[in-house]
Image: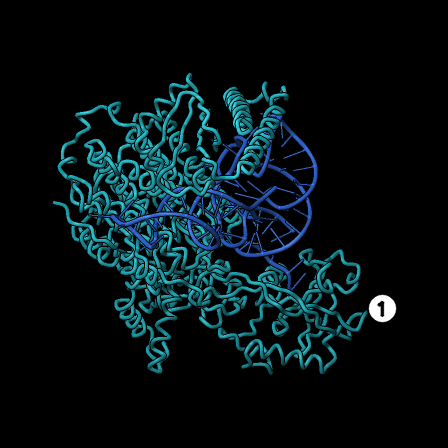
Chain colours: A cyan, B blue
RNA sequence: GGGCUCAUAGCUCAGUUGGUUAGAGCGUUGCGUUGACAUCGCAAAGGUCAGAGGUUCAAGUCCUCUUGGGCCCACCA
């Protein structure tokens, strides 16, 4: 007995129930099974602070489709879930939360503050994990990992040590991106440059007097430099000009007096200076600009840091000490102006790095940080992609990746925040700064060099990405051996599931994450971490702006699920997202998915109401051959398998939208609109019963990865084998059932029906009594038999019960005729309509056909076409031409018939 | 400065290795339906594929340039 299907599909009643069912039965979890091939997807771990947005919904739907598809195809399918501790982001959130109690993190102290972060994480950190369940994500939750797990941290420490021992990690003072609000260093990737409207300030630096002067030498009173950041002038230790610059030739080696500070600074020459820009003379501030830093090193200049970590001016700034940097800028300009040393101000478009967390303008800042030497790691990672071992979809991202990798800069990995992996670096107070550095897995009791026990750990933590780049193998507990805390054998898991299969992510994190995972995978596992990388687009609003909470233009996926259902959300997102293109979303776009879900629901309901379950209990295929099936049954089977083949082809190429649209068109417009309508009058026929059921059941399985909930709900109500559609097998592609001849024949029938419908509309004939005659050439047995043997439903679908098939043209007097595939379709006019207007219509048709004929003929008059084009194209064109010529002939006959 | 990407129906977009009749969803218009579904069905209208040149027997598709959007990278003070 089948459960009845209710009239309305109501997603919220079913989604939660099935999700729980799947999870309770353990369908999401996977274990090493050497008899099966693994298929592994690593979730891009969302931040613990994250809440589900459309980008996640899109990203995770792609992954879930891949995972469910491969699971059904018989792979040991593992979707590894987890969250990222997101150092700065999380610290900021918790700082805000304690601020409500009037506390700063410094009030609590490091240890207490970290405790609070963990408490926060326990309470809110799995929000997004719960939300992912709402969209149906079939992650193996039993393997859930967190980048700050105790075990995960062991991987991080191990990696740090190995790189350090290899000489790939070093400490040094360099200009880094400093966020004055977060009080930490940032990597170059974390300080994205954004255009900024600013000014170019032209400052006069007076030439110092009392210098060795050559008699008769005509020296200017001052040198003018141009700068966008005048406040840094307090740290200037030189002026640089291009050695080729004639304007300044005689000034090289001379000294100027730095205004406001009255420091004597030299004019140096360096080819790095662009003569075209500004005045051709550059102020050099080695402690506040990366270029100036390089100049400073090269020319042995002094490095004067003029700011505190919070971007207030420090003691080196003289009387400006204590002023915030932009306040100091104003004051300095004012003072220079007063002294007549501000020559001019010109508007200037510039770009400045912004903190990726708080969007504060970063300060290029000289400080001592830890770095990873990247070039040696990049080398094999470049090779792997160039050799095609790792492929990007769409391929264009390959170039982006290679370009970055080939110009890779060292990676600043130390952060001056509290939440994160502490550097496994210790210092001995007994030794000096250089020799007292100890890198160790555990805190050493004594200094190995001097034996002192006075040892302390580095205060810094590692960049968050320094843990996430290990995700492909740290999630399998590398480098641990033996049983994992979750009871699996670590090495075995790693050996079986690594390398993973497909990574699905957005372009924004190719540098942050994807490239670094490739480097870490090759370095620490000796193997690439994944084979395919599918890069999908960004979700934008209808205006094309990136959807984000701060812009207030986001559509909450959970709201969409509430209103339309999870399957509708998934299907809509997938079907409108072309490979690698951005998606422009508005809420109405989810109606398409909702409507499709409803269509599936109602078609199933209809089938259930008309299905005798006994008729499908036996595998009736045994009892009849394909040839015994009616044309329409052979046709729908063929269309199903053609569609299946397309879906597989598209999924294998990550063309999800094409796969979704194939399914949509097949199920709705072929199965529902044509097939079910055709078999309706004869629905109890055992063949129809069986095929109808089979097509529905198999379609549900193919649609399941896209729309997991509704397919499960319906599948369970029909006769089925197994516990759940999600662990049923993917339909086997039976190519021999694809029947192009049946598809061709059905398309002739569809054309005839559509033609009659159109003629009826044109003549405005109400339903019911319509005399139609289809006249077929006596030699055309094929079409005659085709139409005669399918006459019943041609009549009913064209609502022309009096339809007759005739072998010869019989004059009906006045008639309206269409010519189609060599057939005359004719409706007697019964003197009701204006013949002249139909003559005009026919004349127009003749004209159109004649112009087509001319186009074809010119094609054939071209010898190159006949000689160079492939034979089958030429043949096809010939056929089209003869068909057109026949049509014109017949149309003429019809038109002339009117005259009779 | 270098690179990527987009421009196709009123709107939002598909269109894979070039093949001659360029598709979908929404919208519009007309018709229809008393038991699968109005969250429906049948139809229609609507496109010189941004512009110019080139390659080719054949170009929405490949190449060059132009125009106009979007994005990324880069040390121009």
Q: Residue at x 42, y 23 (%)?
A: A776
Question: From the viewer's perspective, is residue A250 above or below residue A476?
Answer: below
Q: Nearer the viewer, residue A450 or A322?
A: A322
Q: Chain of mark 1?
A: A
- The image shows residue A853 at horizontal and vertical percentages of 58, 26
Q: Is residue A587 visible?
A: yes
Badge 1 element: loop
Q: Is residue A647 visible?
A: no
User: Which image quadrant: the N terminus of chain A?
Assistant: top left
Q: Nearer the viewer, residue A570 or A55?
A: A570
Q: Which residue is mark 1?
A: A218
Q: Dividing the picture into quarters, in which one does residue A420 lie?
A: bottom left
- The image shows residue A791 at horizontal and vertical percentages of 32, 29
Say whether residue A879 is left or right of residue A283.
left
Q: Nearer the viewer, residue A396 or A746?
A: A746
The local crowd at label 1, few if under 14, some if 14 to 19, many if 20 or more residues have their Cα within 10 Å, is few
Q: Nearer the viewer, residue A887 or A92?
A: A887
Q: Residue at x 33, y 34 (%)?
A: A801
Residue ranking furthest to the left: A1
Q: Dividing the picture into quarters, in which one does residue A349 lie?
A: bottom right
């Amino acid at each position: 007995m089948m459960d009845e299907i209710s009239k309305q599909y109501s997603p919220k009643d079913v989604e939660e129930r099935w999700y729980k069912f799947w999870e309770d039965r353990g369908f999401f979890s996977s274990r090493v099974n050497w008899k099966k091939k693994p298929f592994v997807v690593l979730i891009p771990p969302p931040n613990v602070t994250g809440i589900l947005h459309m980008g996640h919904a899109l990203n995770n739907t792609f992954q879930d489709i891949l995972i469910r598809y491969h699971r059904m195809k018989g792979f040991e399918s593992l979707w590894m879930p987890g969250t990222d501790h997101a150092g700065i982001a999380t610290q900021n959130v918790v700082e805000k939360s304690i601020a409500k109690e009037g506390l700063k993190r410094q009030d609590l102290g490091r240890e207490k503050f970290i405790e609070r972060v963990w408490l926060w994480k326990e309470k809110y950190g799995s929000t997004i994990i719960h939300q992912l369940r709402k969209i149906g994500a079939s992650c193996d939750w039993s393997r859930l990992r967190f980048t700050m797990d105790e075990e995960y941290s062991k991987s991080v420490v191990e990696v740090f040590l190995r790189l350090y021992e290899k000489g790939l990690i070093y400490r040094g003072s360099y200009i880094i991106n400093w966020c004055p609000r977060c009080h930490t260093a940032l990597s170059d990737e974390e300080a994205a440059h954004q255009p900024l409207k600013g000014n170019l300030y032209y400052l006069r630096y007076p030439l110092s007097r009392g210098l060795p002067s050559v008699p008769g030498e005509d020296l200017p009173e001052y040198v003018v430099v141009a700068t966008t950041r005048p406040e840094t002038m307090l740290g200037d230790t030189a002026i640089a000009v291009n050695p080729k610059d004639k304007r300044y030739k005689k000034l090289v080696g001379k000294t100027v007096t730095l205004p406001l500070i009255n420091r004597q600074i030299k004019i140096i020459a360096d080819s790095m200076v662009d003569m075209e820009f500004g005045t051709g003379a550059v102020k050099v501030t080695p402690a506040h600009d990366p270029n100036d830093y390089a100049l400073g090193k090269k020319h042995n200049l002094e490095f004067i840091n003029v700011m505190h970590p919070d971007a207030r001016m420090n003691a080196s700034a003289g009387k400006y000490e204590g002023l915030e940097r932009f306040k100091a800028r104003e004051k300095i300009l004012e003072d220079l102006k007063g002294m007549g040393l501000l020559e001019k101000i010109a508007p200037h478009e510039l770009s400045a790095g912004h903190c990726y967390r708080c969007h504060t303008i970063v300060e290029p800042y000289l400080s001592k940080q830890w770095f990873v030497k990247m070039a040696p790691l990049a080398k094999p990672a470049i090779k792997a992609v160039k050799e095609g071992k790792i492929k990007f979809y769409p391929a264009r991202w390959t170039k982006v990746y290679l370009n970055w990798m080939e110009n890779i800069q060292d990676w600043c990995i130390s952060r001056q925040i509290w939440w994160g992996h502490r550097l496994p670096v210790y210092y001995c107070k007994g030794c000096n700064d250089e020799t007292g550095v100890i890198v160790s897995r555990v805190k050493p009791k004594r200094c190995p060099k001097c034996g002192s026990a006075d040892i302390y750990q580095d205060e810094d933590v590692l960049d968050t990405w320094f843990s996430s780049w290990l995700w492909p193998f740290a999630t399998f507990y590398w480098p641990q051996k033996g049983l994992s805390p979750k009871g699996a054998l670590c090495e075995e898991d790693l050996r079986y599931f690594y390398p993973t299969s497909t990574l699905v992510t957005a372009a924004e994190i190719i540098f942050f994450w994807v490239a670094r995972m490739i480097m870490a995978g090759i370095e620490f596992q000796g193997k690439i971490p994944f084979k395919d990388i599918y890069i999908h687009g960004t979700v934008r609003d209808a205006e094309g702006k990136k959807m984000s909470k701060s812009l207030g233009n986001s559509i909450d996926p959970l709201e969409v699920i509430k209103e339309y259902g999870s399957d509708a959300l998934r299907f809509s997102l997938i079907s409108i997202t072309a490979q690698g293109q951005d998606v422009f979303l508005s809420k109405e776009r989810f109606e398409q998915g909702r409507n499709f879900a409803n269509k599936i629901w109602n078609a199933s309901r209809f089938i259930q109401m008309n299905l005798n379950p006994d008729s499908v209990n036996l595998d009736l295929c045994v009892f009849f051959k394909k040839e015994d099936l009616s044309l329409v049954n052979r046709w729908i089977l063929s269309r199903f398998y053609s569609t299946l083949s397309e879906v597989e082809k598209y999924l294998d190429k990550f063309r999800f939208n094409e796969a979704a649209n194939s399914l949509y068109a097949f199920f709705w417009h072929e199965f529902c609109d044509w097939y079910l309508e055709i078999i309706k009058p004869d629905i109890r026929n055992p063949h129809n019963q069986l095929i109808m059921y089979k097509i529905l059941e198999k379609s549900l399985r193919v649609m399941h990865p896209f729309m997991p909930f509704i397919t499960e709900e319906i599948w369970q109500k029909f006769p089925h084998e197994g516990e759940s559609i999600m662990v049923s097998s993917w339909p086997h592609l039976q190519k021999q059932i694809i029947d192009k001849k049946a598809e061709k024949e059905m398309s002739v029938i569809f054309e005839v029906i559509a033609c009659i419908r159109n003629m009826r509309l044109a003549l405005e004939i109400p339903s019911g009594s319509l005399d139609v005659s289809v006249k077929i050439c006596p030699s055309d047995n094929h079409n005659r038999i085709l139409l005669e043997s399918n006459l019943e439903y041609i009549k009913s679908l064209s609502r022309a019960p009096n339809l007759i098939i005739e072998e010869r043209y019989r004059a009906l007097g006045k008639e309206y005729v269409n010519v189609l595939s060599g057939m005359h379709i004719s409706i007697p006019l019964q003197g009701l309509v204006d013949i002249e207007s139909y003559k005009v219509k026919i004349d127009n048709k003749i004209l159109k056909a004649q112009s087509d004929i001319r186009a074809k003929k010119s094609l054939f008059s071209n010898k190159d076409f006949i000689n160079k084009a492939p034979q089958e194209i030429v043949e096809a064109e010939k056929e089209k031409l003869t068909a057109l010529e026949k049509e014109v002939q017949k149309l003429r006959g019809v038109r002339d018939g009117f005259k009779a």
